[in-house]
Amino acid sequence: MSPGSLALLTDLYQVTMACGYWKLGRADEEAVFNLFFRRAPFRGAHAIAAGLQEALRYMAEFRFTPEDVAYLGTLRGNDGQRLLEPGFLAYLASLRLTLDVEAVPEGTPVFPHEPLLRVRGPLAQCQLLETPLLNCINFSTLIATKAARICEAAGGDPVVEFGLRRAQGSGVDPEVDSYSGFFDNGRRRSTGLGDYLRVHEVREVVVLGLATDYCVKFTTLDALSLGMAATLVEDGCRGVELAPGDVAAALAEVRAAGGAVRRSADLLG
């Protein structure tokens, strides 16, 4: 899979099915694929739809690069022959999606057998998108549903969640993935946290977790750069310390930027 290309983030089954449609002359027949679930997670009655932004971005950028096509050309079947014909590979190389997409808005409660997303267009295109769209929507919807249940159970109390370290998909989106809570690694794009806090009139953040000299430090510095007051909880963190003194240097950097470094007893007492 080439850098910047995620067309091969799929099952080989989808590619061979699309090839079959192409060989039969049916690749451009109109089809409709509905994405839905049969049973709500966590023994609940509904789910919270999520992942739409990621799905739309995937479709907008979908293409097979020359490197992708070259790799597919190396695949062999059980008989040792080419799995995919050169004509089909040429079809993939020039393929651009021409689909209509309908979806429920992000954050909408949805119920079993109710479509979260529908794609309408050429059969082969719909088939190639089946696995990646399930990947985009399913996990995000699961996490959004769990988050909604936790917040409801908390009864209005604050909720702190560390699920990112266990989340599928983390580290594959260079536009969002980060070791700061506010920006991507190159500060080219906001994660949306700053806007969210601003809308809710949150003017001060308290940061703790892992690791002092990476995520915690950069999240605190970014909060300060956005005009928020920021406090780093020293004994609520642990450092990586690739080099001796990294943690001390991180704390000094936060103080120099105008942030506070305090211990949990000071905050709770």
Image: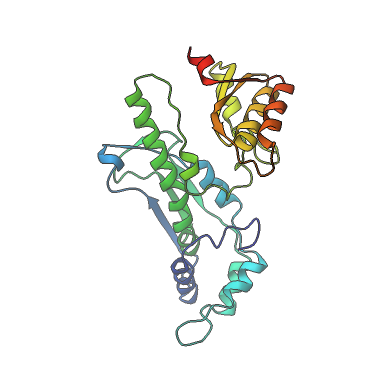
Q: Residue at x 62, y 58 (%)?
A: 5
- Camera-nearest residue between 210 and 169: 210
Looking at the image, is 78 positioned above or below residue 188? below
Looking at the image, is 258 positioned above or below residue 189? above
Measured from the top left, where is residue 8 in percent x and y?
Answer: 55, 63
User: In the rendered image, is residue 257 in sight?
Assistant: no
Q: In the rendered view, does 137 fall on the left or right side of 206?
A: left
Tell me where residue 266 sits by quadrant. Answer: top right
User: Which residue extends farthest front?
Assistant: 244
Q: Residue at x 41, y 40 (%)?
A: 143
Q: In the rendered view, does 49 fall on the left or right side of 246?
A: left
User: Which residue extends farthest right?
Assistant: 256
Measured from the top left, where is residue 155 in percent x and y?
Answer: 34, 20
Colour setup of the view: rainbow
- Camera-nearest residue between 266 and 103: 266
User: In the rendered image, is residue 154 in sight?
Assistant: yes
Measured from the top left, where is residue 43 in percent x and y?
Answer: 25, 40
Count how many numbered circles sit on residues in the image: 0
- The quadrant of the picture occupied by the N terminus is bottom right
- Camera-nearest residue between 47 and 245: 245
Measured from the top left, where is residue 112 in percent x and y?
Answer: 29, 43
